[in-house]
Amino acid sequence: RDPAHGGGASFVMIGNLAASLALLVVLLWFGAALLHRLARYVEGAGTSGESLLATARRLPALAGALGLAAIAAALPLVALPWLPEALSMPAAAALALLLAWAALRISMLVPELLLRGHGAAGALRRSWRLTGGAAWRVLVAFLLVGLLVLAVLLAAALAAALLDLLGAASQPWVAEGVALVFVGAVSAPLGAAATLVIWNDLRLRAG
């Protein structure tokens, strides 16, 4: 085996991993900044630049909160390989439901961290308290948003297929790229607005 080839493959893998991580951070930053900007817009204050800077300052705390949640979610997965084969599938299904329920309970993490100034652990605790007894209501609200995003996705896919069929794009990936940008431009503000509305509703109900 050529050592140089192995080293080159490792370098490419590390580069891909770093690029994926950087993209994830940027997407997280812009998504959180969008929610922050919507909240400030409702209040009639702030600018987009201020929201980007405010969110950038909170990225370490946000990453810490998501890291804590990821560790807590990963711990039960360690036990799955040790279970008998007859129990592995039911246990995996039960764990998936449990993780989905836990995701609902911490779904107010970002607004609590950005708009209320809590730290990583504090934002997780506050989101857990806010959604206590309201998980089904939060689930229905996010499902409705998901249906709207799905409708947008289907419309974009249909438009991309039509453009490809008519030969409007010289390359198929051009139409697909335009469709993805359109979906992101619609779904990101919709998701941020829905999170903000749900969060304010939960805060009012909690008093």
Image (spheres, grey):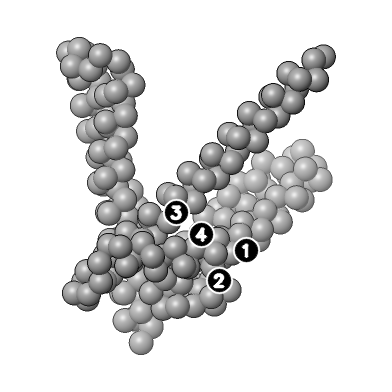
User: Disc 2 or 3, which lies upstream in sequence?
Assistant: 3
Q: Earlier in the sequence, mark 1 or mark 2?
A: 1
Which of labels 4 and 2 is toward the front? 2
Q: Nearer the viewer, mark 1 or mark 4?
A: 1
Which residue is painted at 38% across and 65% down in the image? Answer: 53
Q: Amino acid at mark 3?
A: Leu
Q: Nearer the viewer, residue 72 or 92?
A: 72
The residue shown at (60%, 38%) is: 17
User: Can residue 135 be seen here?
Assistant: no
Pointer 4 or 2: first along the chain:
4
Q: Answer with mark 1 or mark 3, whichever residue precedes in sequence.
A: 3
Q: Position of residue 110 (x, y in %)?
A: 43, 66
Please give the name of the residue rendered at 70% of the width and 29% of the height, measured from the top-left corner: 10
Type of amino acid at the residue the image marks with label 4: Ala
Quadrant into which the N terminus falls? top right
Residue bearing mark 3? 28
Judged from this view, the residue extending furthest toward the bottom is 207
Q: Which mark is residue 120?
A: 2
Q: Quadrant of the C terminus?
A: bottom left
Location of mark 1 (residue): 68
- Would you name the residue on which mark 4 appears? 103
Q: Nearer the viewer, residue 152 or 117?
A: 117
Q: Secondary structure at mark 2?
A: helix
**Element under disc 3:** helix
